[in-house]
Amino acid sequence: MKLPRIMLAAPASGSGKTLVTCGILQALVNRGLKTASFKCGPDYIDPMFHGRVIGTRSGNLDTFFTEPSVTRWLFARAAREADISVAEGVMGYYDGLAGISTRASSADVAGTLQIPVVLIVSCQGLSVSVLPVIQGFLEFEEPRNIRGIILNQVSEGMYPDLKKLIEERFPLQVLGYVPRRPDLALKSRHLGLVLPGEIEGLREKLNILAEVLEETLDLDGFLRLADTAPDLKYEPPVVPVLEGNRQVTVAVAEDEAFCFTYKDNLELLTDMGAELVTFSPIHDRALPEGIQGLILSGGYPELYAEALSRNKTMRDSVRNAVNHGLPCIAECGGFLYLHEALEGADGEFYPMAGVLKAEAYRKDKLSRFGYVTLEALEDQMLLRKGRKIRGHEFHYWESGHCGSSMRASKPLRQRNWTCVHGSGTLYAGFPHLFFYSCPEAAWNFLKKCEVAPCLH
């Protein structure tokens, strides 16, 4: 199928990928183009900027989580409804597993999807030295897929000279430049960018940026380059579905504190027969009635610990439901919420749901970071003993009791550890799971929900 597509990547993190991607997406939307957007890697926050703010259909592309055929399907499912699809790379273009491989890198995704790549190169502190940077990326590995260049942090006066030098030396299109605009920068915190709702005047900033890029980038050339992508072959994976058009109702936490949820996970559950309803552990008084399952996603509960603690009726509702066997998946932030107490970002400890008899507290550095493969060490709700699923961790908070139902192993490394509180009705742990890496985990959860009594 013909699916116009393009990737924006960079030599390193901090090169301006997200800002430039958001500006281009906003410009395309402002032109009236139906646009899909994607983020390479296990990122939650950048897709929020793409989807919630700009209004594109957004998702993740990750070749550690999924086999090539599934990666192509997840891309095509959204891309086939769009005039153009834009993927944002992760870290440096060739940076992949364990920091020592190109597998699961932006380059790996580009090869899997046969997608033309535009390299965003920061010229801060560089002029002619930008040439060997580009040369190195072009010569490092095949297939590289790099077809264009955008120069970031460069002046209007210097840009024509750099464009001429690059195009004389390399078979690349220089598609424009991004001037220095510190007033349009996106702020960061310990898990990456701050959330879209926390940036004052974000929509206005992105529209200003889009107007700037309409002037400084060759967006028509950008669209033509996307249109050179070859036809992409894909087919949907076969997944089980509840019999007789039955549905089970699953509550999904969604508010300021709980916002890290893979859209692909929710869509897989829906395809299998789940009816999803959202609720807020901060603002609602209790869990929704009639539910048969519960998902407590990751997010920033530490920033809202006082508000979560103050909502005692919700804490009681969650504790009673989970303790009485309501099937529950609690990942990272949701896992923290199930503790007896959580140290907030202000350093105070606040009572939480009290399902797990331990406290969660802050550490001075990342406790664990990156991809993991989880192996079940005993039969439990999501997996039988010996079965595996893939996920990732990224957290500064730690638990007094991380669990021992699964073994987490780092890819390409010898490091592993036990984690996860797993039972016949519970998954609670730091790792965020990607269901398409093991669809049976999603199916096992739904089958457990199917026989669970509705919450009244």
Image (tube, rainbow, N blue to C red):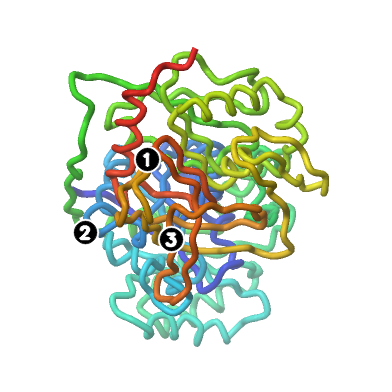
| Mark nearer the N terminus (2 vs 1) | 2
Against 109, residue 306 (above or below) is above
Query: Looking at the image, can residue 203 be seen?
Result: no
Against 378, residue 308 (above or below) is above
Locate residue 263, reporting x and y percent. 42, 40
Q: Residues within 10 Å of mark 2 (few under 14, many from 20)?
A: some
Mark 1 residue type: Met
Mark 2 residue type: Pro
Question: Residue 407, labelled with which disc?
Answer: 3
Please tell me in which quadrant of the rendered image residue 138 appears: bottom left
Locate residue 90, reporting x and y percent. 48, 63
Locate residue 452, reporting x and y percent. 37, 23
Horizontal placement of 159 versus 169: left or right?
right
| Of the pair 347 and 197, the residue shown nearer to us | 347
Q: Which residue is mark 2?
A: 230
Against 108, residue 41 (above or below) is above
Q: Residue at x 33, y 64 (%)?
A: 110
| Mark nearer the N terminus (2 vs 3) | 2
| Mark nearer the N terminus (1 vs 3) | 1
At mark 2, the secondary structure is loop
Horizontal placement of 48 versus 384: left or right?
right
Question: Residue 248, labelled with which disc?
Answer: none
